[in-house]
Image: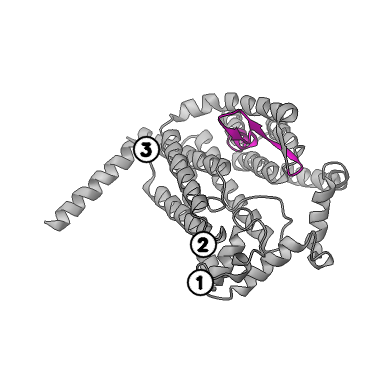
Amino acid sequence: MNQEIDSDQMSYSRRLLDALRIDPVLLALLFILSAIGVVLLYSASGANTDLMIRQAVRLVVAFVLLVVVANIPLRLIRKISIVMYLLGIVLLLAVMFFGEVGKGAQRWLDLGLIRFQPSEILKLAVPMVVAAYLSSRLLPVGWKELIVSVVLVMIPVLMIARQPDLGTAILVGSAGFFVLFLAGVRWRVMIVLGVLLSLLAPILWKVALHDYQRLRILTLLNPESDPLGSGYHIIQSKIAIGSGGVYGKGWLNGTQSQLDFIPERSTDFIFSVFGEEFGFFGSVLLILLYLVIIYRGLYIAADSSDNFGRMLAGALSLTFFVYLFVNTGMVTGMLPVVGVPLPLISYGGTSMVTLMAGFGLIMAIRSSRRFWNN
């Protein structure tokens, strides 16, 4: 009898998820990762329950948004891509003239009731508009399509980099160029682009980067040259991760984090807290969880029969990997500090909402495939 009840409950849950157009595997993985983030944030914030509750509330809002986005028809997503893109550009222009300045950067718009970072919209709008443009063209990508796509990507990237916000610019640029890659850019085109980028690197170093950004890159090569200044973040982060050993010191027992040696330990450097408390073994399991989520997104992309859906789902999944790669590389001293959060674990609302909306798009692509199959 109990087995029959359990079977009926599972069947009902499956029907409910299907009705909500939700991928149960991806939803479960995202829920586990988010739960880990809330628990870790409690430790990273010094047992600050208010911070943990605010994060939990944001997660509820983000998951609701995921369900809403997952129920948008794919054809409508394609149609509104250009509207989202143009809206994002207009808001970036508004930031230039009316944006709030904080910590030397002008990135935020304060509309009274809400305060948000318009560049987050472009993390979704750029891959959407590039995928919509290329899906209506003959693939693989030719020179004309390549030039138009690069222009569509670089306009917001340069505007965001000017704020300055190099981390977000990298993520937006990656999302757009992943669409190009998935559209089938020929190898000779990729080689030409690589050569051009190499030739432009000295100019970009002088013109595009601010003094503090160049300092971060130089500090990466030798953080001990300024251990109490520009190298402090990287040095303390590496000490914390290394002191965790194989199995870690245990939850709430990290000395580097609890004694406030790790800067930005609730946001950009929260992986350092995890590494100290759960060690190498725990860090590997966390990264594996991320990789399974990315694999699921790529599986949905590969299963899509629509070029727009395939390119968009693939680009969003690979951009999620860029989040992970840049953040873990940053806190372990392999990449410069560029302010990219650890997805769904670092404290913050705007980035979390954007990520969940992206996974909502992936689920909308999956449900579109199921709809046509049925």
Circle 2: residue type: Leu
Q: Amino acid at mark 1?
A: Gly
Decide which of tag 3 and tag 2 comes sooner along the chain: 3
**Residue at horizontal 49 percent and vertical 59 percent from the top:** 289
Question: Can you tell which quarter of the image residue 112 is in?
Answer: top right
Q: Which of labels 1 and 2 is toward the front? A: 1
Residue appearing at x 67%, y 65% in the figure: 261
Q: Which residue is mark 3?
A: 21
Q: Secondary structure at mark 1?
A: loop
Q: Are marks 1 and 2 in contact (CB under 8 Å)?
A: no
Return the residue at label 1.
Answer: 250
Q: Is residue 314 magenta?
A: no
> Given the current orientation, which residue lies at the most extreme left position?
1
Q: Are marks 3 and 2 in contact (CB under 8 Å)?
A: no
Looking at the rendered image, the quarter that the N terminus falls into is: bottom left
- Residue positioned 69% across, 35% down in the render: 153
Mark 2 — residue? 286
- Is 371 above or below relative to 297? above
Give the extent of the magenta segment: 103-126
Q: Nearer the viewer, mark 3 or mark 2?
A: 2
* Residue 218 pos. (x, y %): 83, 58
Quadrant hosting residue 351: top right
Element at badge 2?
helix
